[in-house]
Image: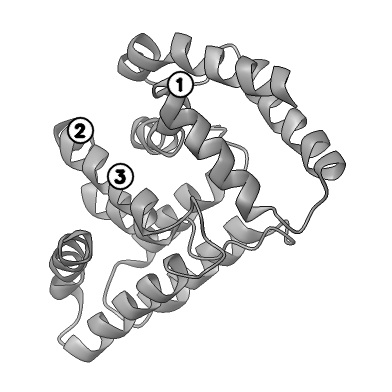
Amino acid sequence: MQIDTLNNVWNQLLEPYTKSQALIDQGFELIIRHYSATDRHYHNLHHLYALLQLQLEHSDLIADNENFLLAIFFHDLIYDVKRADNEEQSAMAAAEYLWQTSYPAADIEGVMHFIRATKTHVNANAHPDLDYFLDFDLSILGTTADVYAGYAKQIREEYHIYTDDVYNAGRKKVLQHFLDQPSIYKTEGFREQRETIARQNLLTELQSL
């Protein structure tokens, strides 16, 4: 069912910008292939679908839903735990595909900017849509303790090639980075609903490492 929903959204996004159904299908196959890879335990189709659901719930607050949705589809396209440039590679993959359509060049740059921002989760230009995009990407942090524990376990599985010592050291830096921020979430709604829960979840995981 999730696949059907993803496919419908994808087709509606691309149909105005290309007459080639083959190109649309090729793009969707690219998305499915990457997000369905066997080494994906969290950054998979379920994550993609969860972000699409959040976009649907908040679409009236988002100025450019097309750019937003395309950034969702491509933001974790490339995900290799041994690389430090996944976001850049994902942004370039998005551009490479969209250049084959009539999607406006300035908007392609906008999509790439959103994807790149997921590396640091910093919104230097205070773009309102990007605030929502980054909050959606971190929404899992502010979920119930059991859901968060499942997420933490999935992340560890994605980094299974590393020993506990190496993984724990890196994970501690990531968790502390978010805890050191004035706020994890950028939008008022997410701060009100999830900030306190997220901080507790992060502290609990940090203390367990």
Please give left or right for residue 84 compared with residue 88 in the image.
right
Seen from the viewer's position, the closer of residues 42 and 65 is 42
Which residue does the image show at 26% across and 76% down from the upper left? 102
Callout in the foreground (2, 1): 1
Numbered disc 2: secondary structure: helix
Which residue does the image show at 76% across and 30% down from the upper left? 173
Label 3 sits on what residue type? Ala
Quadrant hosting residue 60: top left
Seen from the viewer's position, the closer of residues 174 and 106 is 174
Please give left or right for residue 85 compared with residue 38 in the image.
right
Q: CA distance from mark 1 to mark 3?
A: 18 Å
Which residue in the structure is indicated by mark 2?
Answer: 58
Q: Which mark is residue 145?
A: 1
Residue 90 can be seen, yes or no? yes
Q: Is residue 42 above or below residue 98?
A: above
Seen from the viewer's position, the closer of residues 160 and 192 is 160
Q: CA distance from mark 2 to mark 3?
A: 13 Å
